[in-house]
Image (cartoon, rainbow, N blue to C red):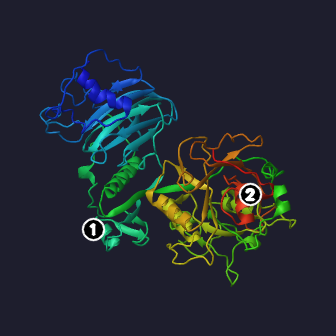
Amino acid sequence: MHIRFLFQVLLPAILLAACGGGDGGDEAPPPGTDTFSISGTVTAASNVAVDTDTNDPDSVYVSNNTVATAQAIGNPVMVGGFVTATPTFSLSDRFTVTADPDDVYAVDLVAGQTINLEVVNTPTADIDLGLYDGSGALIDTSLGVARFETVTAVASGRYFVRVNAFSGKSNYVLAIGTGVVPASTLRLASEFLPDEAVVQFQEAVVTAAGGVAALGYQVKAGVPDRPMLVSFAGPRTAVADTGSLPEPLAGTHMSPEQAAKLSTLYRIKAMQGRADVRSADPNYVVKAQKTPNDPYYGLQWHYPLINLPQAWDVTTGTPSSGSVVVAVVDTGVLLAHTDLSNNLLRDGAGNVVGYDFISRTTSSNDGDGIDPNANDAGDESTPSSSSWHGTHVSGTVAAGSNNGVGVTGVSWGAKIMPARVIGKGGGSSYDVLQGIRYAAGLSNDSGTLPTKRADIINLSLGCQNCYSAAEQTLFNQVRAAGVIVIAAAGNENSSQLGYPASYDGVVSVSAVDMERKRAPYSNYGGKVDVAAARQQCRWLRRWPSEDLGQQHRRPGLSLLSGYVHGFAAHGRRGRPHEGGTPRTDPG
């Protein structure tokens, strides 16, 4: 094996270091520079492999560009490789006049295992990652424009991994079972709405709507000074249309639904590469964080677990400065519920301060788009199968207490601001953005602002592999406005990053069981800030609305009850510790 080859390709794989421009050429030393020769034996570690068609003309060439010629690799493994979308036109290269856009690897993976790609020559090169099962069916793709790409195996078995040069040329490091890298932003496996994107243009753009129209797209909602909802439906003239998309990998196939989603991702990728676009992200589907049903609500065991009765001896959550407002961004709230109606934030005329931001009538369940009515219309076709998740969350935060009705809320004095963003089949990340903006007193699609912005925003909802630059920017703005944001870490029993809980500035909360151990369904990992007791329950009473006519199950929530109580009771930021409420540290 050639020493030069090892240093140009294998060494970057070991050190995760850049190797020049990745073209494999030699550079003459500056005049007057001493030169040295080295000799000896270089031995690669057992879990290190090298792409068999690198750009080094002195190395042995074995094509690995298709499923039929896939290069077999082990697991765990770290692979050093090279791909180029066009010829390099360098006389010292192997790919002087031909391209090498694809490397394909065959590997046995375990369910849930991630495949991570680090691209050396960013931002000049855009290298993507694809995953196919043993039959050639497309499983996942990662199409971001940044340094890292990630895909995940859904089940144990044989897979094909595709490294594709969308543009430019670069060395890369493919790692399986050897660590975790930052999450990529454009994943086919993520749940999002085809033909839609959340886009914000640069401030210098005079008319963002005109810029969108010039691409053959249209603005569905929003205004240029904040992220807008863009539709790709209709005439399309953007860069990422069919003429510039990479060729499908021979021997593989995908469903029509995957093709529609993939087309959407490539159009978003094209927008991310435009100088006049600040951010472009899929319009992700988010869902309430539900858990398996438990027996009837017999004991609120999670309250003693956080010493809440002792805290109530000090304060029941009504600070001298007035009520603390907690915005519940969720499925809405049953506004007529007797255990909640007195604890809803109201304006001077007695109207509930809240809003319904579900823009798609197909999922709103109330027959219209956004409006001032935040009443929960259900998130299923029939009331009996709906979760009424936002009502349960609101009850945990501030159900009427010491009133002989229903259950007890953590804070006896907090006021709930309902923002309805989840309906039938879930909600969209664009609608969630509007609900958060409203709660924080920022401009939003309703054209209105609450009479008092929220002090705390609770987000017991989310999705995995759905990072959005627009959402991170919003949370930076919300925190700068003095609003505390608390989000569920998620219930997938996974260390995969879930959002919004994993954004900077958001308090990520996981769940523990009665023995103070991590609940078996709760997510975990370095992005989790605190863990708290969590209750899955039913309220042991009938709803006041006669049209429901039955008890309904109450799915649980990832809500840090003691944390919220500390904020609501003391009107302060930081970790609660007064009055016996336990202090918790990040971990």
Q: In this view, does 427 lie to the left or right of 175?
A: right
Relative image position of residue 487 (x, y in whole percent): 61, 55
Q: Is residue 158 left or right of residue 542?
A: left
Q: Which amino acid does label 2 sit on?
A: His
The residue that label 2 is drawn on is 552
Up-down relation of residue 444 to residue 410 (above or below) = below
The residue that label 1 is drawn on is 214
Toward which corner of the image does residue 254 lie, by quadrant? top left
Residue at image point 27% right, 47% down: 124
Q: Is residue 133 visible from the viewing direction of this image?
A: no
Relative image position of residue 192 (x, y in whole percent): 46, 54
Of residues 516 and 476, which is closer to you in this image?
476
Please report whichever mark, 1 or 2, sits nearer to the chain's N-terminal start: 1
Q: Quadrant of the N terminus?
A: top left
Of residues 530 and 220, which is closer to you in this image?
530
Up-down relation of residue 384 to residue 222 (above or below) = above
Taking the view exactly as shown, the residue that stands out farthest to the top is 40
Between label 1 and label 2, give the one nearer the viewer.
Answer: 1
